[in-house]
Amino acid sequence: MSKGYFAYVLHSHLPYVLSHGRWPHGTDWLCEAACETYLPIIKVVQELIEEGISPKLTIGLSPVLCEQLADDSFKSEFVSYLIQKIEAAQFDSVEFEKLKQPGMLKNSHHWIKFYTDALNHFNQVGQDILAQFKKLQDDGYIEIITCGATHGYFPLLSRDESLQAQTKAAVKNYKKHFGQQPTGIWLPECAYRPKYNWTPPVPINGKQEPYLRKGSDEFLSENGIDYFVIDSVLLKGGKSQGVYIDRFDSLKMLWNQFEKNYKPKEETFEKTPRKAYLVASECDDKKPTAIFSRDPETGVLVWSGDHGYPGDGNYLDFHKKRDPGGHRYWAVTSSKADLADKVEYNHESALNRIPENSDHFVSTVEKIMDEYSQDKNDNDGILMAPYDAELFGHWWFEGPQFLKATLRKFAQSDSVELTFLKDHLTRTKPKQIVSIPEGSWGQGNGHYIWLNKENDWSWKHIYQAEEKMCRYAKYWHDHKDVRSDELTKLIKQAGRELMLLSASDWQFLISTEAARDYADLRLQEHFEDFNRLASMIEKAIDGSQINADDLKFYDECAARDCLFAEFEIEWFAKVDYPAE
């Protein structure tokens, strides 16, 4: 008899990059993630199935990512990308042979095989990664959850209409791609806000007055979503372990500024991340939404490049790359080693570390669940381990093999059983309703990564666009008699630009300085595109003629940002159940 349950939850997301650059920032991001993470995860699941193992892996696929993976332009771009990577490795191979560097030569052969295998795998699945994920879900081997449509940061968006649109678009997009209703959602950045009188952090039309806002959970309940994921600190207090801070020096600097005014909430031991609870901002007339809490003990083992498995000196180093081509030929060596001191990578030595690391992870989970079972006399506890999917393969090249090894060992464990989160809800039927505070899974659980002096200007743009979009949508809703096809298509495209403008990725990239110039540019481009569309909407409302240059701009904009064909203006016209 098992003493508890275990669930991996992998969150897959990338901002909309199609037709918005290629390298160093743009579609290469999407191609890297598809090659290094999404295809390897599919392969891992398929191999486990062939062994007779049901991995019961929960994976989140954000709607904006789904739209890109399904786009024909991505499919052709991805094939070209893989061919280019193969040719680059072949070029390296010739160079290493001339230089008589056998270790590097072996690694170049490894890359030729890796990208050739990826190309063959992509073709084997009909160049349709999403369809393969759907098949694995339809066959009962994985559970796919959704996310805010464009990864908008729920607590900081100024209009309930925006949260409604992010949620409704997510549900409708999920049904389009996967043919069913989603049961779970990964709120972007695991960020939550309860119902209260909210004051915008930057002025809206020169004002910063509080007004009543709905809780994030209300939008989920209204749209049939049963559960979401939170950081354990939001459940029970204590000090947060930020998931990104080890990877970006700029976040450490921001945290040093924020930490002066941060006081951890007193940890309460009445609630535990080993159980699912219910959250309800409106207890009277809405179905409560369940929450699962991130396990604080195992998170650092996989997340941290300093203290976790990815920091093992044998694994492939992420940062050091060889130009031209960008292939990686060096090992981590030491988490503190300078790039110049990295030693040659040895793939066999790296794979030899997987058994020990996977054994340690599984035994750690088993120990935690055994202690919980004995202490609480409860064999229905759960340990949920949520991670960014891109950690497995992209950031940590050997990660998919670690994932495969741990899933196999959990499937064979006598004390811990693999589970889907939806099945755990059915099994345990949680009844206890709790209140959780506003917060995220960033260090300190605040919003400082997504709102600070470096990126607060972006929220002024977003708030201005939100106000205009809601005004136009309401006009469209209230004036059915004068609606034109032209006005409808303009408002819909303005809505898409607003949702792309609202992506939390831009503030994150500014704070981490990972791609600040690109994020600045994308924010400005979407804001300018929205405003140009807004001026055309004003003309259409006034009955003025829209000139040929503007119409040409619309065509170009609609072709470039062509996601969410299912977009509905009604989402921004009125809130289904306004805050009261």
Image (cartoon, rainbow, N blue to C red):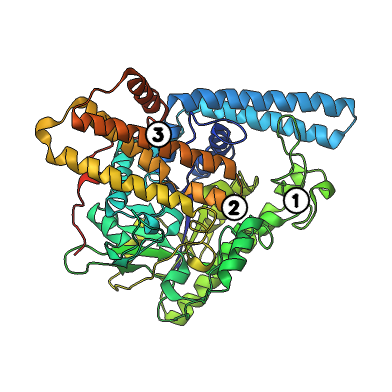
Q: Please state which of the two labelled residues, at mark 1 or mark 2, is closer to the viewer.
A: 2
309 left or right, relative to 278: right
Residue in the image at 90% along x and 30% along y: 100
Dot 1, crowdedness within 10 Å: few (<14), some or many (≥20)?
many
Q: How far apart, in angstroms, are the residues tagged by discs 3 and 1? A: 43 Å
Mark 1 — residue?
A: 332
| Residue under label 2 | 512
Q: Position of residue 385 (x, y in %)?
A: 50, 60
Q: Residue at x 55, y 46 (%)?
A: 390
Residue 222 in view, yes or no: yes
User: Dots 1 and 2: beta carbons under 8 Å?
Assistant: no
Quadrant including the C terminus: bottom left
Instruction: Provide residue 433's location: percent of width, then percent of height.
Output: 29, 72
Q: Earlier in the sequence, mark 3 or mark 1?
A: 1
Name the amino acid, label 3: Asp
Q: CA distance from mark 3 to mark 2?
A: 26 Å
Please provide percent x and percent y for residue 419: 42, 57
Q: CA distance from mark 1 to mark 2?
A: 21 Å
Q: Earlier in the sequence, mark 3 or mark 2?
A: 2
Secondary structure of the residue carrying tag 3 is helix
Residue 529: mark in rendering: 3
